[in-house]
Amino acid sequence: MITQMQVRKSDLTDIQLTQVPVPDLAEGEILLSIDRFALTANNIGYALGGDMLGFWNYFPAPEGWGMVPCWGFADVVASRHSDIAVGERIYGFWPTASHVVMRPADVQAEGFNDAMDHRLALPEFYNRYQRTSGEDAALTAIEDERCLLFPLFGTGFMLYDYLVDNEFFGAEQVLIGSCSSKTGLALANLLARHGEGRPRVIGLTSPGNVDFVKALGTCDEVVAYGDISAMDGRKLSAFVDMAGDSQVTGAVHQCFAANLKLSTMVGATHWDAPRVKVQVEGAPKHSFLFIPFQLAKRESDWGPGVVMQKAQVQSARIAQEMKDRMTIHHANGPEATRKALADLVGGRASPAIGQIASLSRSA
């Protein structure tokens, strides 16, 4: 049987464990046992964008329910594909489940696409899977960090590249909402290393995470959400938001108004916060940035695979820098995994804790 962890789309706190039969494999299909996956604020963003951005469509579930997509590792346990062998270890985008069936296409030495019918119309970025057998030993030695950090740091890199590609939108400083999130701290890290002409880096975070963000040493200033109104609103600023909290966004727009050159949302760490539209005269519209669009642009600018290689190099560097600042917890088994997701949804997850979970491993 396959164990699936599903959430109610209308209430992410409603989490159920269910079992479904293992289907018979058709010719060209493979069955993978999902060994481990990360649970981070990124997963909340996928759930909130599930309908608008299609994230619920990657791994279908019964009406009203969805499986939150996550990044991790799986092993091929059955194969009817001539180019994919039992025992291969694969890195990529998985459902919160113990197993999944895929139909590999465009199989190359480094990876393949999943060509299941329901995924054909979805962005290739999330459909591409990496075969790990030929990877460098240094990379295979940090599987947990790769699950936890590489997707988020990769997003941070694409955000940084988006800002660079647009010359920081003419801003003197970049305001990073939810800077304690993995994506936020990666963006701060990259901006801090930008060199000549870099904008000031301002980390916005909750009061309880101020010391954590300050200790990273990548922000020129760290501001608690409640102190945003006291900032100097005369400075030309770009606001990159991972929080998704309209009160935070409203405070930024009220403070900077027409001096805000960019206001964009990438994630939603404050998933249960009000989503009231912010309208401040002179301020730009607070818009959502879909990272695969910037990825596609760079694929065209630089050639296939170059941007992902750059992102992976920077992700590995930041992961090594963060290794001693983060404790990794493992939740093995269905009940432990459900609790880990419930803690994440309930805002009880610490930014200094990295959560790895597995529905296929014993508790």
Image (cartoon, rainbow, N blue to C red):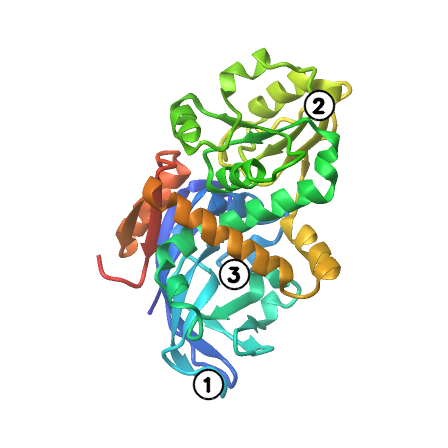
Q: Position of residue 225 (x, y in %)?
A: 51, 20
Horizontal side of 97 relative to 239 (left or right) equals left
Please tell me whether mark 3 sits on a helix, a strand or a loop.
loop
Q: Earlier in the sequence, mark 2 or mark 1?
A: 1
Q: Position of residue 284 (x, y in %)?
A: 74, 28
Please identify the quarter of the rendering in which residue 147 is found.
bottom left
Toward the right, the furthest residue is: 282
Toward the front, the furthest residue is: 196
Please tell me whether mark 2 sits on a helix, a strand or a loop.
loop
Q: Check the image and report above or below for 265 versus 358.
A: above
Q: Earlier in the sequence, mark 3 or mark 2?
A: 3
Please tell me whether mark 1 sits on a helix, a strand or a loop.
loop
Q: Which residue is mark 2?
A: 236
The amino acid pointed to by label 1 is Arg
Which numbered circle lies on residue 80?
A: 1
Q: Residue shown at 45%/57% (left/top)?
A: 71
The amino acid pointed to by label 3 is Pro
Horizontal side of 53 relative to 26 (left or right) equals right
Q: Quadrant of the C terminus?
A: bottom left
Q: Position of residue 148 (x, y in %)?
A: 41, 50
Q: Earlier in the sequence, mark 1 or mark 3?
A: 3
